[in-house]
Amino acid sequence: MKLSMPSKGKTYTVEISERASGMLVYHARFLANVSEAAAKRLINQFETQSQSLRKQPERFPWLSQPMLPKHKYRKLLFEKRYLLIYQIKGDTVYVDAMVDCRQDYRWLL
């Protein structure tokens, strides 16, 4: 297993998948029924947190699930209950999904 050390000052490109964007829309739409302010906050935090992956995306832990290849996906928790699931390939961070931790998201894997 080869693990690379984070490079100081290195900037990554962040790519948001259509799937992750759709999940954000789904969760924001649901939240907007309860609180428009909460929905806006979720969208803003998604943007902020996903763009924070431009610097040191290795700082977040691995997503460990028995059905996943070891050390493929990482997870970033934000807004207390949402996970960004992403992987790093070369100089690019691919955000593959956004899930609500309170739900069973094993179907995604």
Image (spheres, rainbow, N blue to C red):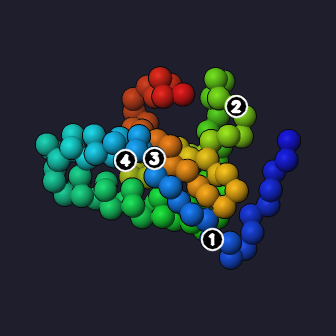
Q: Which residue is mark 2?
A: 69
Left or right: 1 in relation to 54: right
Observer-side mark, 4 or 2, equals 4
Left or right: 74 in relation to 38: right
Q: CA distance from mark 4 to mark 2?
A: 24 Å
The answer to whether the residue labelled 3 contacts the one labelled 4, judged by CB atoms less than 8 Å apart, is yes
**Residue that appears at 15% across and 44% down:** 34
Q: Which residue is mark 1?
A: 11
Q: CA distance from mark 2 to mark 1?
A: 26 Å
Q: CA distance from mark 2 to mark 3?
A: 20 Å
The answer to whether the residue labelled 1 contacts the one labelled 3, judged by CB atoms less than 8 Å apart, is no
Left or right: 2 in relation to 94: right
Residue 90 is at least partly visible in this image: yes
Q: Which residue is mark 3?
A: 17
* N-term-proximal mark, 4 vs 1: 1
Amino acid type, mark 1: Thr
Q: Which residue is mark 4?
A: 21
- Farthest residue in the bottom direction? 9
